């Protein structure tokens, strides 16, 4: 190593450290780039997410037919559905409809299989809980009847709206081609 | 301190008690007060401030939830670590493993004995003060080697060995830089070194001659390396060694290592202030002893803490050096340069036995120019920021 390169090494070290220090100092007096989640943002993150975002699963029990397609399609069996026949009224009721968020891998196969689009991904992603049991979502609190699709369309306006929402979700977002057609159209 | 105790004994406060017992109690009490009132909050607040400064330099926010601006974060961390399980691996050498954090801690805490916070505020003004600091801070090596060896873990051992090699190597440039000041001041006592300087910046040893100016930066770099700080933190290089010698530690013992690291930052700053930056010297503005004492303490604290801040800043700026680069930097560059500083200072003292006031003022102006150029570059960096790279939450 020659004397010239030795001196040059020292000079390079000093000047590059000096320059680096100016850059970091300029960041110190600048505004941080990160934003304060969750309490210093103008709108909740959930509202800014794209509609096809695969968040935590939600089920609209009013239009669930109890076909068990989602339970069969789930590759990790995180959905458990219980259906019971009422002896007196001869009506089939849900006893439970649980989705274990701990196990769910957000593959979206259940939403694709659903004939009415009642099970779907929401925009919700904050699943923090103090124990794993708190992460099991219970959609049936007391025995509720199954939904029966009527021939010639739904007549109850409230239910008709929900059916429309479900079918729209099914057409646009839960299809394997990614709803590209719907987005283009 | 001893004079004060002697005064109390003469005044008859401890009637009938043996002198030695009073001394022993006073020593323990002084250590306790220094530790609990000054060192523990200082190390804690430094840990919080370092995380905040780091975060802001990386354009993040940093811990800001516990207390106003997160200033109580260190208390939360301390309590958390106290409550955690103190785990000793079954294959570890249990005795050495439990002892090591305390050796490291003692090594750093002993340095506070001779740190002069004011003209009266010093635990003991030893006549070998600076030598004592070099000696006790070397005790840290023993603790780190003990931790590395007793953990019975390859990462811990590698970290401990690297740390020992690094600290022993960097003690040479640090010692030589300190020696230039010892020559100039003609004493090794901390108070003596401060008294040899004045309150004005051109009376500081930093601006005494170009060689002490260089020696200051050599000392600071070597001290950072001795304190295992980034860019010299290869003993705990996360990417290679998990956490180095602290890999197997948990709970309070783990905390002790970091307590020592953050407290050690202040020791580095205090020693640099004492040796080069005029220590507690203040302009003659007041003759009230209490007010003067407070003023001296504030001045000393601010000067020392500036260098703590700069250590944080260096850590946020520079990447970690490789082991061979670390050793090359020490043996090929810093040792010869610190020898050069030592010889230069000796020649300077031969040429100007009483110092050269005009040259010192010129050096001070040069220092100001460097700072001014620095801020010019900072403004340049701010102007050339790339706002289009800012994080956009709404895609």
Image (cartoon, helix red, strand yellow):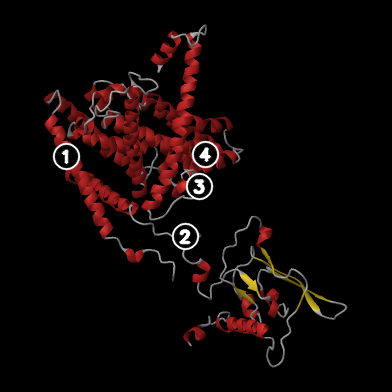
Q: Residues within 10 Å of mark 3 (few under 14, many from 20)?
A: few
Circle on res. B254: 4
**Residue bearing the label numbered 3:** B66
Q: Position of residue B370 (x, y in %)?
A: 20, 44
Report the residue that reaches farthest toward the top: B16
Q: Position of residue A122 (x, y in %)?
A: 58, 72
Residue drawn at point x = 46 percent, y = 50 percent: B64
Dot in front, 1 or 3:
3
CA separation, marks 4 and 3? 22 Å
**Residue bearing the label numbered 1:** B365
Q: Position of residue A63 (x, y in %)?
A: 69, 80
Dot in front, 1 or 4:
1
CA separation, marks 1 and 4? 45 Å
User: Which element carries disc 2, helix, strand or loop?
Assistant: loop
The one nearer the camera, B348 or B169, is B348
Chain letter behind tag 2: A
Quadrant of the rendered image containing residue B385:
bottom left
């Amino acid at each position: 190593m020659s004397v010239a390169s030795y001196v040059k090494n020292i000079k390079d070290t000093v000047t590059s450290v000096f320059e680096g220090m100016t850059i970091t100092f300029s960041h110190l007096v600048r505004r941080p780039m990160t934003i304060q989640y969750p309490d210093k943002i103008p709108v909740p993150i959930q509202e800014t997410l794209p509609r096809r975002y695969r968040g935590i699963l939600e089920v609209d029990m009013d239009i669930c037919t109890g076909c068990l397609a989602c339970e069969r399609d789930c590759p990790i069996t995180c959905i458990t559905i219980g259906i019971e026949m009422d002896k007196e009224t001869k009506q089939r009721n849900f006893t439970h409809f649980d989705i274990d968020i701990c196990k769910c891998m957000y593959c979206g196969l259940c939403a694709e299989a659903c004939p009415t689009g009642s099970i779907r991904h929401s925009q919700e992603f904050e699943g923090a809980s103090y124990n794993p049991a708190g992460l099991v979502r219970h959609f049936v609190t007391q025995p509720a009847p199954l939904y029966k699709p009527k021939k010639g369309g739904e007549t109850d306006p409230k239910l008709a709206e929900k059916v429309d929402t479900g079918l729209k979700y099914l057409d646009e977002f839960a299809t394997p081609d990614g709803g590209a057609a719907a987005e283009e159209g | 301190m001893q004079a004060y105790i002697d005064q109390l004994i003469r005044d008859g406060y401890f009637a009938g008690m043996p002198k030695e017992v009073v001394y022993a109690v006073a020593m323990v009490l002084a250590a306790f007060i220094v530790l609990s009132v000054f060192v523990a909050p200082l190390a804690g607040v430094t840990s919080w401030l370092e995380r905040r400064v780091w975060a802001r330099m990386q354009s993040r926010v940093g811990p800001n939830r516990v207390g106003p601006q997160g200033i109580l974060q260190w208390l939360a961390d301390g309590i958390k670590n106290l409550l955690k399980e103190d785990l000793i691996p079954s294959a570890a050498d249990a005795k050495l493993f439990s002892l090591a954090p305390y050796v490291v801690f003692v090594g750093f805490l002993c340095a506070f004995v001779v740190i002069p916070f004011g003209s009266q505020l010093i635990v003991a003004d030893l006549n070998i003060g600076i030598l004592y600091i070099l000696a006790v801070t070397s005790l840290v090596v023993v603790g780190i080697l003990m931790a590395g060896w007793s953990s019975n873990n390859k990462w811990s051992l590698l970290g401990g060995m690297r740390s020992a090699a690094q600290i022993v190597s960097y003690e040479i440039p640090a010692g030589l830089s300190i020696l230039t000041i010892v020559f100039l001041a003609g004493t090794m006592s901390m108070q003596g070194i401060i008294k040899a300087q004045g309150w004005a910046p051109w009376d500081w040893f930093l601006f005494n001659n170009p060689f002490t100016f260089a020696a200051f930066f050599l000392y600071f770099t070597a001290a950072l390396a001795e304190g295992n700080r980034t860019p010299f933190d290869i003993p705990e290089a996360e990417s290679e060694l998990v956490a180095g010698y602290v890999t197997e530690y948990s709970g309070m013992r783990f905390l002790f290592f970091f307590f020592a690291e953050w407290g050690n930052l202040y020791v580095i700053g205090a020693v640099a202030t004492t040796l080069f930056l005029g220590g507690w010297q203040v302009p003659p503005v007041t003759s009230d002893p209490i007010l003067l004492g407070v003023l001296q303490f504030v001045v000393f604290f601010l000067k020392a803490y500036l260098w703590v801040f700069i250590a944080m800043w260096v850590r946020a700026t520079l990447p970690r050096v490789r082991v061979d680069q670390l050793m090359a930097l020490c043996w090929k560059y810093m040792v010869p340069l610190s020898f050069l500083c030592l010889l230069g200072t000796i020649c300077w003292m031969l040429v100007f036995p009483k110092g050269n006031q005009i040259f010192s003022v010129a050096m001070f102006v040069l220092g100001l120019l460097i700072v001014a150029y620095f801020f010019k570059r900072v403004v340049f960096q701010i102007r050339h920021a790339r706002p289009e790279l800012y994080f956009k939450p709404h895609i």
